[in-house]
Image: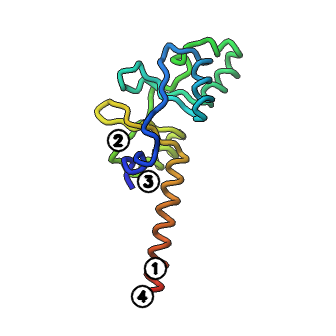
Amino acid sequence: MQISQLLRHKDPHVVTVEPSASVRDALALLARHRIGALVVSSGDGAVDGIVSERDVVRGLHDTGPSVLDDPVSALMTAEVHTCPPGASVHDLARTMTDHRVRHVPVTEDGRLLGIVSIGDVVKARLDELEQERAHLVDYIQTG
């Protein structure tokens, strides 16, 4: 299965935050949308970075509550692993595992198309396995 197929089943809206927004504002967005990460973007469709709940927790540990008033750019991961819509779910799973990331923005020609979480990848893989099982059962029963 390709990432483009996976994106068809998701809300096309990606919640983003500007690099200059406060960490407090980013937390409000995470809570409001019940998500674990935000794509950091200057608004031109480009991915400037990504900030997750874990980044905020680490920032609180390292800096204390004053980090909440810092800009998101102070906590974000600037070197973001992205993937094209034509990538396979298997390849993305490997990337996520190898780089220990849970959210990967999907981009094409430098433009943000969506975001995929590890949960999306696991669900897609389970769906594939269920389809394979159903085909095998059908083959055995009719063969």
Q: Quadrant of the C terminus?
A: bottom left
Tag 4: amino acid: Gly
How far is mark 2 from mark 1, CA to CA?
34 Å
Tag 3: amino acid: His
Of the pair 111 and 64, the residue shown nearer to us? 111
How far is mark 3 from mark 2, CA to CA?
13 Å
Question: Which residue is painted at 55% across and 32% down in the image?
Answer: 37
Say whether disc 4 or disc 2 marks the residue closer to the N-terminus.
Answer: 2
Across and down, in percent, residue 119 comes to 55, 47
The answer to whether 43 is drawn above or below residue 96 in the figure is above
* Residue carrying label 1: 138
Crowdedness of circle 2 by 10 Å Cα count: few (<14), some, many (20+)? some
Residue 84 numbered mark, or none: 2
Tag 2: amino acid: Pro
Give SS at disc 4.
loop
Say whether disc 2 or disc 1 marks the residue closer to the N-terminus.
Answer: 2
How far is mark 4 from mark 2, CA to CA?
39 Å
Across and down, in percent, residue 60 comes to 68, 21
Question: Which residue is painted at 48% across and 85% down in the image?
Answer: 141
Residue 93 numbered mark, or none: none
Q: Nearer the viewer, mark 2 or mark 1?
A: 1
How far is mark 1 from mark 4, CA to CA?
8 Å
Give SS at disc 1.
helix
Say whether disc 4 or disc 3 marks the residue closer to the N-terminus.
Answer: 3
Q: Quadrant of residue 83?
A: top left
Give SS at disc 3.
helix
* Residue carrying label 4: 143
Say whether disc 1 or disc 3 marks the residue closer to the N-terminus.
Answer: 3
Crowdedness of circle 4 by 10 Å Cα count: few (<14), some, many (20+)? few
Q: Look at the numbered discs 2 and 1 and tell me whether their residues touch, using CB distance below 8 Å.
A: no
The answer to whether 69 is drawn above or below residue 44 in the figure is above
* Residue carrying label 3: 90
